[in-house]
Image (cartoon, grey):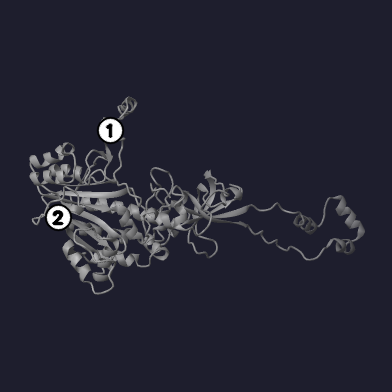
Amino acid sequence: MASSEPGAHMTPSTNKYSNRVILKTIFERSDGGVGFAGQRVVIGGWVKSSREMKEEAELSQNVGTKDARCMEVLRFPLLRSILKALRGEGDSRVHQKMDLDVPKPPRPALTLLQLSDGSSLHRLVVLVSSELASPSQILPTGTCILVEGTLQQPALQMKHVIELKADRILHLGTVEPNSYPLTKKQLRLEFLQNYPHLRARTSTVASVMRIHSAITRALHAFFQDNEFLFVQVPTITTTLTRGSSNKYLVNPILDIQEASNEAKAEFSKNFFPQQMYLTDSGRLHLEAQACALGNVYTYGPRFQAKKSLPEMLIVEAEMAFSKLEDAMNCADDLLKFICKWILENSTEDVKFLSKRTDKSIEDHLRLMTSCSPEKISYTEAVKLLNQATEKKPGNSMEWGVPLTDEHASYLVDKIYKKPVIIYDHPKNLKPFNVRLNDDEKTVAAFDIIFPKFGTLVSGSQSEERLNTLSSRIEEFGLSKQHYEWYLDLRRHGTVQHSGLSLMVDSLVLFATGLYDIKDVVPFCTTPI
């Protein structure tokens, strides 16, 4: 393993699966990579900026300032000069001056490339001679190049401390400069939404993607460290938590009574014999696993027919033998763990985005690691909003209606000035499977609301009582037939259990200081 001590002889490690050195492994050293000087490496990446320069011709050394040809004739006798000429002798200085007058061929051009491979914010300066590749091929921004060469310290004092002198080009992917959209230095995020397949090449979006990756690693680390098992749940299902409104149908609906014979024949070709949906939540199936394995979690896309973000990336967890308070504590610990992980493992990207998007990113992350959200009931929240003496965020709020974004913002920004957990919501605002409280008006559910970003985590204690759950299914107008398997969990060894759902895309927004969800989703399915 390479040492990180400056001055130690070392060889940068080559990536096992691409036979090249990742730039992050060079620049993560405390000396910025100087300890790797003299090592031969293979580097691959995309040109971020470039310039062409001509190598300066060496200064000709002045070997004589006077022409001695006439003086030789005058100084020596004529006979001696003739004899020397016959013997082929001559003044060597004359030959030297004649050699200097012969024009030399032009030196090759040198192209300086700033190369990025996406592993970090750092760029490596690569020196490529025109003898290896024509400057017109490698100068354009976006060119992909894989080169072999020697790492060296710059000959002159430069901003960078290490560079690569290429002596071999292994791959060259040229671009069409006239149609490549990322040629400008500063591009608006709204503009980049038109090019989701290319925008990760920009510094800002690349930093967002690396933080997104760090959050994913942190999620798995937290649950694995706390003895959760990772399980998969179906993406295509017949069971939904809130009914079929605003949900994605996988196969079309057919009214058998009014359908023509041709329509019936066409419908019979469907892969599924009944209506199937893209799942809006994995919690129902996760409960089945929790009732056998204990604590489990899953991670994947969830779907809702809404314009803002129809496909959401969500991590969900379910815990057997736990109640609402346990789920709230788990959510709090999870958020603290992730924020600390980002601060420790994505320092450079956080500092970079702080300059580009929001200067308070680091402060918000540190605040989350040091304090817990304020906990208030939905009823208390309504009371606070209606009793506020300052400028109210809109009309007075009635009990039983959802909190608007303005109401939630007022609670976290004006009253508590930190994240807030709102629990015990009216039963009509939450899914059918949430446990009914003793007042029979509210259910054991909670939301964690963040300043400027809204709800990041939702959770609940599931209803473990068979009769109550059956009644709730009927209240929501759901087909009991589709939920028989779910009711079986109550018939056979029921247990109290609770869980949570964390909106990963919204958490990335919070961690990067951005405000448009489309800027943190690699490929947004919403038409732009």
In this rendered view, identify the residue nearer to me: 388 or 461.
Answer: 388
Whole-number angstrom distance, CA of label 1 to CA of label 2: 38 Å
Choose top left, top right, bottom left or bottom right for residue 33.
Answer: bottom left
Mark 1 nearby-residue class (10 Å; few <14, some 14–19, many ≥20) = few
Mark 2 nearby-residue class (10 Å; few <14, some 14–19, many ≥20) = many
Q: Position of residue 483 (x, y in %)?
A: 17, 39
In this rendered view, identify the residue nearer to me: 210 or 522.
Answer: 522
- From this viewpoint, is residue 117 visible? no
Q: Position of residue 15 (x, y in %)?
A: 39, 46
Q: Which mark is residue 255?
A: 1
Q: Which mark is residue 444?
A: 2
Of callouts 1 and 2, the N-terminal one: 1
- Residue 512 lies left or right of residue 81; in this view the side is left
- Residue 403 lies left or right of residue 130; in this view the side is left
At a point 25% along the width and 43% down the height, the residue shown is 244
At a point 52% along the width and 44% down the height, the residue shown is 173
- Asked if the residues shown at circle 1 and circle 2 are in contact, with their CB atoms under 8 angstroms apart, the answer is no
- Residue 141 lies left or right of residue 59; in this view the side is left
Q: Amino acid at mark 2?
A: Ala
